[in-house]
Amino acid sequence: MIRDPAVAGQFYHYDPKNLNEQISECIDVNAKKEDVLGIVSPHAGYMYSGKVAGAIYSRINLPDTFVILGPNHTGLGARFSMMMDGEWRLPLGNVSVDSILAKEILINSKHLESDLMAHQSEHSIEVQIPFAQYFGKDFQIVPITMVHYAPNDDFLEICKDIGIAIARGIKNTHERVVIVASSDLTHYEPQDIANKNDKEALNAILELDEEKLFDRVGELRISMCGYGPVAAMLVACKELGAKDAELVKYMTSGDTTGDYGQVVGYGGVLVK
């Protein structure tokens, strides 16, 4: 099974040379790399959120596999979907799905399903991969999409189930893995409101507190599209021994466009 790119030429350059140049403008060549358990990285077009994504990927040592959790914006396919095998075809080269780890995660979750449709047109996972490929090609992926829910206890429990399943799968396979939560923050609010609300969400993430994140998203009505993937990532990382998190970069679309009337927020976080 080959999954072709859905947003190449829209969210990022299709031509490999131009794409490498585009990414090179976003990375930090002086960043000190380290081993991490998880990251939060945005998924907008590179002209808007690329500098945040670039700052994050500049800081990490590449693992054997990236488990990438992203929100399902299209509504297609299973609600909680994992692609189990095959390859993703991208401008910088193909990436294989880690079928061994995927199977281990699937058997440990009550909610994940094997499904292809949810991944065909979804951009939130796809846009992460070229940043990793810029630094090296020797890795695999496990792509997981999660339907976007309003905060409620059932959704939080599902996120916990998926996070625990990911951690168990990693422990059983003994692989070096980085868990990526693909998420943008506040959508289409004035800059001051976005800054205020995003700070609350980011503080919950930095405290490694998925329940507090759900509370803040619900109480403040934060239009954060990937809080479910972030919660699952936090649960998995804590199961794997995470003790600390670091905010690497925050900005909004207004910092690119100059229009601060309606912005989208982007945050990059390391979990260690």
Image (spheres, rainbow, N blue to C red):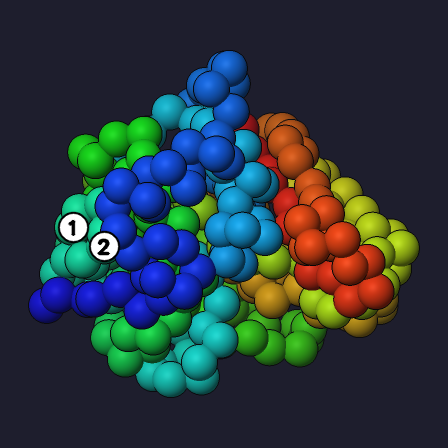
Q: Is 257 located above or below residue 131 in the figure? A: below
Asked whether the beta carbons under mark 2 and mark 1 sit within 8 Å of each other, the answer is yes
Q: Is 20 located above or below residue 144 in the figure? A: above
Residue 217 in picture, x, y percent from top left: 75, 64
Please report the residue visible at 51 percent of the width from the left and 18 percent of the height from the top: 31
Residue that label 1 marks: 94
Residue 16 in picture, x, y percent from top left: 25, 46
| Residue in the foreground of this view, choosing between 139 and 131 | 131
For label 1, count other residues whose C-alpha is less than 10 Å away and answer few (under 14), some (14-19) or many (20+).
Answer: some
Whether residue 65 can be seen here: no
Tell me: 130 left or right of 193. Answer: left
Please report the residue visible at 77 percent of the width from the left and 43 percent of the height from the top: 203
**Identity, as a three-letter code, of the amino acid under mark 2:** Leu
Please report the residue visible at 78 percent of the width from the left and 66 percent of the height from the top: 262
Badge number at residue 90: 2
| Residue in the foreground of this view, choosing between 180 and 158 | 180
Tell me: 83 left or right of 129. Answer: left
**Identity, as a three-letter code, of the amino acid under mark 1:** Asn
Inter-mark Cα distance, 2 to 1: 6 Å
Q: Is 215 located above or below residue 164 in the figure? A: below
**Dot 2: element:** loop
| Residue in the foreground of this view, choosing between 66 and 47 | 47
Quarter of the image containing the N terminus?
Answer: bottom left
